[in-house]
Amino acid sequence: GESVGLHLPTLSVQEGDNSIINCAYSNSASDYFIWYKQESGKGPQFIIDIRSNMDKRQGQRVTVLLNKTVKHLSLQIAATQPGDSAVYFCGDTSGTYKYIFGTGTRLKVLA
Amino acid sequence: KAGVTQTPRYLIKTRGQQVTLSCSPISGHRSVSWYQQTPGQGLQFLFEYFSETQRNKGNFPGRFSGRQFSNSRSEMNVSTLELGDSALYLCASSPDPGPNTEAFFGQGTRLTVV
């Protein structure tokens, strides 16, 4: 699989543009999905969640889309700002563990 | 309301030693989970505690253990440290156990094993 750090998938976006961060999950039984943002030197912070009975959920400048058919999740950030630069993790639950997280995507906002 | 507090923030240990990390959850939160974050493996679930009982455990060797006290504070212990145990250890608290609730993370303890 992909690695965090030097090998972390990176998305570079121009300030003001929209960002789309993608995530695939493997457990078709997962019924709850969550996105976290981790800035350098800090612990992950909750962004938004979505349950499996929904396809879309909107927050402040963020939208999460869930496609259960292809087991795909995406996080859309509108009008990306420099403060959005961070590593973004998606997580799902298998009913056994609290969360299973992906390795993360680094978002770089270009001025 | 104070957030999740982890101590210490940084720790350097020698191979073969053991280490204990501490986590104080948000007041009123009764569930505490621990994660290991490394460049190679990302965020990996270690275990979850609720009411002083371990509810779930991730795929880690028995050298990794934890406990929770009656005030919901939690500790995790790693014995016989290996170089590969170097990582950021994150604690997260939730009001209730189970997967369908938001978890609030602390800033983590950075463990370096030399």
Image: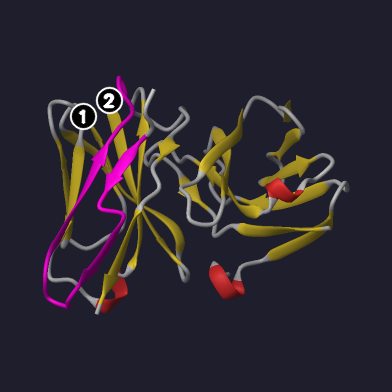
Residue span colored magenta: B4-29
| Residue at numbered disc 2 | B30
The answer to the question of whether label 2 and label 1 lie on touching residues, with beta carbons closer than 8 A, is yes
User: Which percent across, then down, holds residue A74?
Assistant: 72, 45
Q: CA distance from mark 2 to mark 1?
A: 6 Å
Residue B16 sits inside the magenta stretch: yes
Which one is in front, A77 or B101? A77
Q: Earlier in the sequence, mark 2 or mark 1?
A: 2
Say what secondary structure mark 1 lies in: loop
Residue B39 visible (yes or no): yes
Residue A1 visible (yes or no): no
At horizontal 33% and vertical 28% (from top left) the residue drawn is B26
Q: On the rendered structure, is B86 left or right of A95? A: left
User: Which percent across, then down, holds residue B8?
Assistant: 25, 53
Residue A87 sits inside the magenta stretch: no
Say what secondary structure mark 2 lies in: loop
Q: Residues within 10 Å of mark 1 (few under 14, many from 20)?
A: many
| Residue at numbered disc 1 | B72
Q: Is residue B42 above or below residue B105?
A: below
Look at the image and tell me in which quarter the N terminus of chain A lies: bottom right
Which circle marks residue B114 in the picture?
none
- The answer to which image quadrant residue B71 occupies is top left
- The answer to which image quadrant residue B51 occupies is top left
Q: Amino acid at mark 2?
A: Arg
Q: On the rendered structure, is B76 left or right of A75? A: left
At horizontal 47% and vertical 30% (from top left) the residue drawn is B102
Q: Amino acid at mark 1?
A: Ser
User: Which percent across, then down, holds residue B47?
Assistant: 28, 46
Q: On the rendered structure, is A68 left or right of B60? A: right
Which one is in front, A31 or B39? B39
Which one is in front, B66 or A60? A60
Q: Chain ID for label 1?
A: B
